[in-house]
C-alpha cells in the first residue's frame, strides 16, 4: 500500500491502546511515535498466469500481452523441467517432479532461487574429425655424405624469431649482425681482421689481402686497408670499392714486371676512380642522404716483394714496422693526411697537443669525387732484419698510437701466426672502448721464400 490508513473517530495509541488527543505526536502513556509510518504488510505481488489482471479502480488499463501466433502455443515451464548436459557429456537426469503445495498454483514459482556464484560452462560442441590425409610416401634416407641443408637464421637477441630477408627478426624486430660486422681472412703469410666495433651501427672499413708472383717466380704479398669517411654518403661502399680496385691493380701489375712502388701508386689512382664512380650513380642511390658529401674513404697498402717493403697511402690509416727482435726500435712508416699532422709539421703544436685537440682526426686527404687534388704517397724500404708490418685504420692506432705502444700490443709470434696477431690487435681496440670500426692486417717480412728452381 502506498497511502497511510485513515484514523478512526477516537484515535488510540497503536502501542498501548490509550486514547489520544488531536494533534498529539507522541503517546502520553508509552511515548509511542505517532508520526511513524506503519510497515507495509508482508505480502508478495501476484502475477497473472491465465489472463490479464483486472484493472485497479481509477487506474490505467494496460493492453493485454499478445500471445504468439500459430496453431501451437508453448506451455509455461520452469528451468528444472529441461534436461541439462553435465561436463562429462551424457544428459543429466531431470529432477523428480514436485507436488504443488496446498493452495498454490503449479504454474510459475514466485520465489526466486538463489543464484550460484559461478555458472557451469556449456560442454563444447562435438566436431567431426577431418578426413585423414593421404599417406605420403616415405622420404628417402638422407645421404650422410651430402652437405647439410641451410637452416633458417634465428635471431641472436631473442633466440626464437625467424630472420627475414632484410636482416630483421620477425619476433622482436632486432637487427641482425651484417656480414661485414666481423670479417677474418688469411692468405698465405698475410692475415687481416675487421670488426664493426662497439659504438658504430655498421662496419665502414674494408680490406683485401692476397698473394702473387713476380716475373721471376718470387712471391709477393699484398695488404690493402680502407676506412670509409662517416660524414660522406655510403662510406661502406666507398671503402669496399677502393680496396678491391687497388688490390686488382697491384695483382695485375706485379706479374707483368712493374716495380712494386709504381704498382702501388697506380693502384691508389685506380681506387680513386672506383670511388669517384659511386658519385655518378643514379640519383636513386642517394635518396636517403641527399645533402651528404660524395662517397669517400682513406686507403693504406703494403707490398712485400723481392726484399722490398713498399707502402702507399692517402688519409690517416697507418703502417707500423715492428722488428722481430724487440730490442730494435719500431717505427711508423706513414704520415697522416690530417689536421694534427699539419700542425706538427708546421711546428705549431707538439704531437701530444695536436692529437689531444678535437680537430685532430679531420683528414686533409681522401679518395672521393669531392676530394682535393689527389696526391698518393708511396715509400720503399729495405729492412736489414725480419719483422712484421701492421697495416691498420685509426680504430686500432687510437689505442696504440706510438710505435712503442703498437710493439707492446703485438704478440711476439706475429710472423708465425699472423691471423692470431690480428685478432689480438682487434681485441685490444675493443677492450679499450671500440669507439670506431677496427681493421688490421699483419704482413710478415720477408715473405715466404721463392719456390725451388725460380730464377
Image (tube, grey):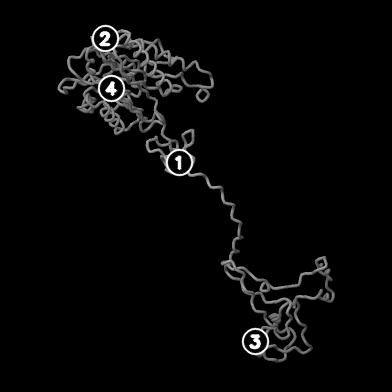
Question: Within 10 Å of the Cα at label 3, are there few (<14), some (14-19), or many (20+) other Cα atoms?
Answer: few
Residue 212 lies in quadrant: top left
| 403 with respect to 108 (left or right) | left
Q: CA distance from mark 3 to mark 4?
A: 120 Å
Q: CA distance from mark 3 to mark 2?
A: 138 Å
Q: Give whichever of discs 3 and 4 has the lower sequence position.
A: 3
Q: Give whichever of discs 2 and 4 has the lower sequence position.
A: 4
Question: Within 10 Å of the Cα at label 4, are there few (<14), some (14-19), or many (20+) other Cα atoms?
Answer: some
Helix, strand or loop at mark 2: loop
Q: Give whichever of discs 3 and 2 has the lower sequence position.
A: 3
| Residue, disc 1 | 140
The label number, if any, that marks residue 31 in the structure image: 3
Q: Give whichever of discs 1 and 3 has the lower sequence position.
A: 3
Q: CA distance from mark 1 to mark 4?
A: 43 Å
| Residue, disc 2 | 216
Residue 254 horizontal/vertical position (percent): 32, 11
Q: CA distance from mark 2 to mark 1?
A: 55 Å
Residue 35 seen by the camera = no
Residue 160 horizontal/vertical position (percent): 44, 44
Relative depth, front residue between 433 and 72: 72
Amino acid at each position: 500500500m502506498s497511502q497511510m490508513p485513515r484514523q478512526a473517530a477516537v484515535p488510540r495509541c497503536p502501542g498501548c491502546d490509550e486514547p489520544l488527543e488531536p494533534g498529539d505526536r507522541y503517546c502520553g502513556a508509552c511515548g509511542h511515535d505517532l508520526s511513524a509510518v506503519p510497515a507495509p504488510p508482508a505480502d508478495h505481488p501476484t502475477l497473472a498466469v491465465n489472463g490479464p489482471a483486472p484493472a485497479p479502480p481509477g487506474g490505467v488499463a494496460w493492453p493485454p500481452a499478445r500471445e504468439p501466433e500459430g496453431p501451437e502455443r508453448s506451455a509455461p515451464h520452469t528451468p528444472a523441467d529441461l534436461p541439462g548436459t553435465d561436463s562429462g557429456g551424457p544428459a543429466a537426469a531431470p529432477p523428480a517432479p514436485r507436488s504443488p503445495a496446498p493452495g498454490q498454483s503449479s504454474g510459475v514459482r514466485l520465489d526466486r532461487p538463489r543464484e550460484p556464484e559461478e555458472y557451469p560452462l556449456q560442454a563444447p560442441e562435438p566436431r567431426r574429425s577431418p578426413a585423414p590425409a593421404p599417406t605420403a610416401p616415405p622420404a628417402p634416407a638422407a645421404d650422410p655424405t651430402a652437405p647439410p641443408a641451410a637452416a633458417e637464421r634465428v635471431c641472436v637477441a631473442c633466440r626464437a624469431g625467424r630472420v627475414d630477408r632484410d636482416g630483421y627478426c620477425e619476433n622482436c624486430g632486432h637487427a641482425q649482425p651484417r656480414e661485414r660486422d666481423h670479417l677474418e681472412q688469411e692468405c698465405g703469410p698475410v692475415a687481416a681482421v675487421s670488426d664493426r666495433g662497439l659504438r658504430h651501427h655498421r662496419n665502414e672499413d674494408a680490406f683485401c689481402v692476397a698473394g702473387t708472383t713476380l716475373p721471376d717466380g718470387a712471391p709477393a704479398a699484398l695488404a690493402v686497408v680502407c676506412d670509409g669517411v662517416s660524414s660522406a654518403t655510403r662510406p661502406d661502399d666507398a671503402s669496399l670499392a677502393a680496396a678491391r680496385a687497388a688490390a686488382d691493380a697491384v695483382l695485375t701489375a706485379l706479374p707483368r714486371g712493374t716495380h712494386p712502388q709504381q704498382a702501388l701508386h697506380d693502384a691508389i689512382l685506380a681506387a680513386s676512380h672506383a670511388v669517384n664512380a659511386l658519385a655518378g650513380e643514379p640519383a636513386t642511390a642517394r635518396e636517403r642522404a641527399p645533402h651528404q658529401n660524395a662517397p669517400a674513404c682513406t686507403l693504406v697498402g703494403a707490398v712485400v716483394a723481392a726484399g722490398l717493403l713498399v707502402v702507399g697511402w692517402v688519409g690517416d690509416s697507418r703502417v707500423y714496422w715492428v722488428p722481430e727482435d724487440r730490442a730494435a726500435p719500431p717505427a711508423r712508416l706513414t704520415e697522416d693526411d690530417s689536421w694534427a699532422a699539419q700542425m706538427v709539421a708546421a711546428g705549431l703544436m707538439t704531437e701530444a697537443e695536436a692529437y689531444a685537440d678535437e680537430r685532430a682526426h679531420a683528414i686533409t686527404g681522401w679518395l672521393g669525387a669531392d676530394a682535393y687534388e689527389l696526391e698518393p704517397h708511396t715509400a720503399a724500404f729495405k729492412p736489414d732484419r725480419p719483422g712484421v708490418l701492421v697495416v691498420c685504420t685509426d680504430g686500432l692506432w687510437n689505442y696504440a698510437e706510438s710505435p712503442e705502444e703498437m710493439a707492446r700490443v703485438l704478440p711476439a709470434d706475429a710472423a708465425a701466426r699472423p691471423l692470431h696477431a690480428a685478432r689480438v690487435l682487434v681485441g685490444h681496440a675493443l677492450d679499450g672502448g671500440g669507439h670506431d670500426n677496427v681493421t688490421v692486417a699483419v704482413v710478415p717480412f720477408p715473405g715466404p721464400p721463392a719456390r725451388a728452381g725460380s730464377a
